[in-house]
């Protein structure tokens, strides 16, 4: 019996996710420039030609991986899409960003690898600078609403703290005390008693 269009679409989604997951791991572990489309296709168990049915280039593949991860982070900080970060949403964001980190260490390893390589970051900088300001605006507005003296600086400090914790966790997941520090981050950056 022939497959339905829904079945073909499901196969396409599964295959695309496999390609992205494979590329994410290879880019993070072996480097973007040293990973070829042929290697990604081989590791994903598909032909190189079929790869191009999903992504027009290695750069397009990297962009999609990075953009999806960044959008997921922005989604966490404004889950109801009202443009306002409430106290409950801030607490939830801090909890969930570290859950996301633990569940998808490959993405975050790639994220930091890309950020630390200027020529690779250049490939995704347009997407990054389109998405990242949304994140910072939500934080700055939150701190402004809580009467923080320098809300932009507090937003930057918060972001740097999250980055630092995530980076240390990615480097040493077995010894970095993530769970005990999450509560401290909430105490420091949520301003719940103001």
Image (cartoon, rainbow, N blue to C red):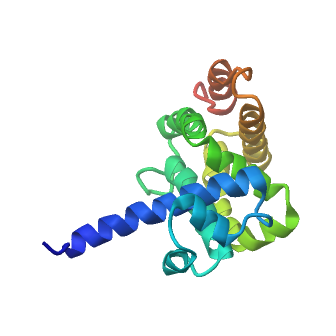
Q: Residue at x 85, y 69 (%)?
A: 119
Of 85 and 6, the residue lying toward us: 6
Q: Quadrant of the N terminus?
A: bottom left
Query: In the picture shown, does residue 3 fall above or below 140?
Result: below
Q: Residue at x 67, y 24 (%)?
A: 178
Number of marks drawn: 0
Query: Would you place residue 117 above or below residue 73 in this image?
Result: below
Residue 193 percent location from the top left of the image: 59, 24
Residue 62: % across, % down: 65, 67
Q: Residue at x 76, y 39 (%)?
A: 167
Side of 6 relative to 113 (left or right): left
Q: Report x, y in % for residue 175.
A: 74, 20
Q: Residue at x 31, y 64 (%)?
A: 10
Quadrant of the frame with the C terminus? top right
73 sits to left or right of 109: left
Where in the figure is residue 128, as x and y percent of width and height?
Answer: 69, 65
Residue 111 in view in this figure: no
Q: Nearer the viewer, residue 116 or 44?
A: 44
Q: Is residue 182 visible?
A: yes
Q: Quadrant of residue 40?
A: bottom right
Q: Residue furthest left?
A: 1
**Looking at the image, which is closer to me, 148 or 89?**
89
The quadrant where residue 51 appears:
bottom right
Task: Reply above or below: 70 against 127.
Answer: above
Which of these two is toward me, 148 or 177? Answer: 177
């Amino acid at each position: 019996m022939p497959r339905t269009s829904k079945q073909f679409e499901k196969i396409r989604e599964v295959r695309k996710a496999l390609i992205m997951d494979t590329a994410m791991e290879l880019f993070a572990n072996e480097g973007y420039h040293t990973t070829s489309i042929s290697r990604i296709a081989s590791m994903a168990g598909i032909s190189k030609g079929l790869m191009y049915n999903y992504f027009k280039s290695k750069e397009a593949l990297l962009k999609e991986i990075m953009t999806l991860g960044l959008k997921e982070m922005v989604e966490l900080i404004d889950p109801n899409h009202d443009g306002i970060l409430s106290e409950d949403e801030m607490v939830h964001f801090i909890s969930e960003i570290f859950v996301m980190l633990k569940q998808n260490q490959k993405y975050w390893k790639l994220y930091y690898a890309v950020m630390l390589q200027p020529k690779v970051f250049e490939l995704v900088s347009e997407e990054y600078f389109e998405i990242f300001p949304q994140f910072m605006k939500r934080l700055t507005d939150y701190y402004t609403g809580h009467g923080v003296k320098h809300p932009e600086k507090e937003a930057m400090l918060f972001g740097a703290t999250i980055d630092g914790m995530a980076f240390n966790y990615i480097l040493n997941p077995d010894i970095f005390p993530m769970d005990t520090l999450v509560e401290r981050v909430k105490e420091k950056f949520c301003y719940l008693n103001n």
